Amino acid sequence: MLTLSEIWIYPIKSLTGIRVKQAWLKPKGLEYDRRWMLIDENGKFITQRENPQMALFDLAIQNQQITITSRRNLQQIAVPLSITTGQNLQSVIWDDEVTTIEPDQQYSQWFSEQLGFKCRLVFFPENHIRDVDPKYAFNKEQVGLADGYPFLIIGQSSLNDLNSRLESPLEMKRFRPNFVFTGGKAYEEDNWKNFSIGSVQLKAVKKCARCVLTTVDPQTGIKGREPLLTLSKYRKEGNKIFFGQNVIPLSEHDNEINEGDEITLG
């Protein structure tokens, strides 16, 4: 039996995730997942790839706000879960240019001070458009500020297999999935097509190529060599290293997904 064991959302792109017991399916993915991000002075998105110190913020959702705490100095700020007004800014995420909103410069100033360089915190509203790569879309699906797809799923068996090859085991949070499941064989998600989590229908479309972000220790913000070094020995195809499966929704939005839901293939 395949069971959904963990659900994760990442309210601010490339900052710490929040594990939740249930989540709502929305047009761009899970509700509140990667609707905010930091951009530089040129409007380009900022991530832990170049700025691993971004790992050193803890996030919590309280009273319709995201509370962000700097682990280095314990300073805090709270931003709304969603906003509708502010300054429109063009932001670049990979090959996409999207219209985002900077609601209040005080948030941008706080992050600039914490990170030590000028940046802006922007929001991507649900009604703004960003298409999934048409090569992998089924019905013109949308995505928020995730790298390319609304969801990422990884089997616990896959992580267990990887950890059996590592000197020091890693937590699943290193790989930033939305969904984790128990049961089944290691890496079986590689071959999934259509599947359901509870009553929500989904489609696996593309194995997830992994980057240096996976080498950032989420506790310390320090880059290492693992897990890419080990994964490269048995999960490399061409010049890419794969771990996890990208997923799009087939169900209409406003469906609920719960930890403990059964996963059905086909």
Image (cartoon, rainbow, N blue to C red):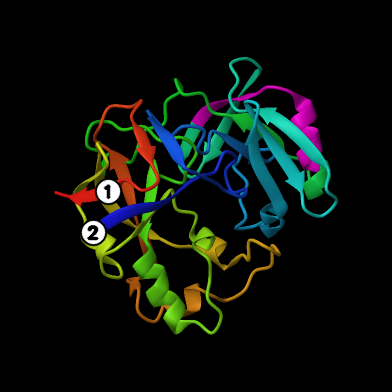
**Amino acid type indicated by mark 2:** Met
Q: Which residue lies under the disc numbered 2?
A: 1
* Disc 2 to disc 1: CB gap under 8 Å: yes
Q: Position of residue 74 (x, y in %)?
A: 83, 48
Task: Give the answer, above or below, for where 101 lies relative to 117.
Answer: above
Q: Is residue 87 visible?
A: yes
Specify which label sits upstream in the sequence, 2 or 1.
Answer: 2
Q: Which residue is mark 1?
A: 262
Q: Position of residue 251 (x, y in %)?
A: 25, 32
Above or below: residue 266 compared with residue 36? below
Is 165 rendered above or below residue 41?
below
Q: Residues within 10 Å of mark 2 (few under 14, many from 20)?
A: few
Point out the residue furthest to the top here: 85
SS class of the residue under badge 2?
Answer: loop
Residue 106 lies within the magenta run: yes
Q: Please tell me which residue is depicted at 71% across the width and 65% down the height of the picture.
A: 220
Image point 40% across, 46% down: which residue?
Answer: 259
Q: Viewer-proximal residue, 87 or 82?
A: 82
Q: Position of residue 52 (x, y in %)?
A: 67, 59
| Kind of residue at disc 1 | Glu
Side (left or right) of 105 relative to 100: right
Residue 18, given in percent of the width and then of the height, sits at 56, 46
Q: Residue furthest left?
A: 266
- Classify 64 as above or below 56: above
Magenta region: 98-112
